[in-house]
Amino acid sequence: MSERRKREDEDASKREDEDAARLPSRRRFTKTLAAVVVAAPVIAARAQTPPASKEPKAPPNPQPTPQQEPPKPSPVAVAYAEVARARFGELLSAEQFEAVKRGLEGNVRTADRLRAFKLKNSDEPDFVFSA
C-alpha cells in the first residue's frame, strides 16, 4: 500500500508542476513585460516607416523668408512701460528697461489672446478644487 501511495504522491506532484508551468507567475510576467518594453519601439518604427519608393524625390525649393520686423508695441504696453519708467526708472539700466518693455509687451499680447477666447457659461474649469 505504501508503494501505491508513493506513486499517487509522485503523480500529484507532477500535475502540480505542470499546472504551475501553465499558470502565470510574477517572474514570467516581468520577463514578458520587459520584452514588450524592448520590442515596442522597434515595432512602432516599422509600422511608421513608409515603403521605399523607387523614384527619388527632389528636394523642395527653399523659399526665401522675408525678415519680419517685430510687431509694433500696443498702446497698453507702452503705457505700462511709462508707468514702470516713472516708478523704477532710476533703478534700471537701459538694457534692463528694454527687457521690462519686451516682457510687458509679451504679457499684453498673451492677455489679448486669452481675452479673445470666448467661454460659454456651461464651460467648467480644468480642475476641481476641494478643501
Image (cartoon, rainbow, N blue to C red):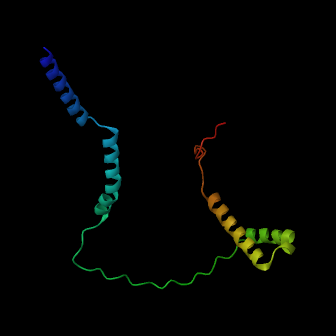
Q: Quadrant of the N terminus?
A: top left
On the rendered structure, is 122 left or right of 1? right
Q: Residue furthest front?
A: 2
Q: Position of residue 105 (x, y in %)?
A: 70, 70
Q: Position of residue 21 (x, y in %)?
A: 23, 36
Placement of 85 over or under 32, stated as above or below: below
On the rendered structure, is 93 left or right of 67? right
Q: Could you tell me which residue is drawn at 50 percent across and 83 percent down?
A: 65
Q: Nearer the viewer, residue 130 or 34?
A: 34
Q: Nearer the viewer, residue 103 or 72?
A: 103
On the rendered structure, is 7 left or right of 32? left
Q: Could you tell me which residue is drawn at 58 percent across and 81 percent down?
A: 68
Q: Position of residue 67 (x, y in %)?
A: 56, 84
Tell me where residue 60 sits by quadrant.
Answer: bottom left
Number of marks drawn: 0
Q: Nearer the viewer, residue 81 or 99?
A: 99
Tell me where residue 122 sits by quadrant.
Answer: top right
Tell me where residue 41 sits by quadrant.
Answer: bottom left
Placement of 20 over or under 58, stated as above or below: above
Q: Residue furthest top?
A: 1
Q: Position of residue 15 (x, y in %)?
A: 19, 28
Q: Could you tell me which residue is drawn at 21 percent across and 27 percent down?
A: 13
On the rendered structure, is 6 left or right of 35? left
Q: Could you tell me which residue is drawn at 63 percent across and 58 percent down?
A: 114
Q: Quadrant of the C terminus?
A: top right
Q: Nearer the viewer, residue 49 or 38?
A: 38
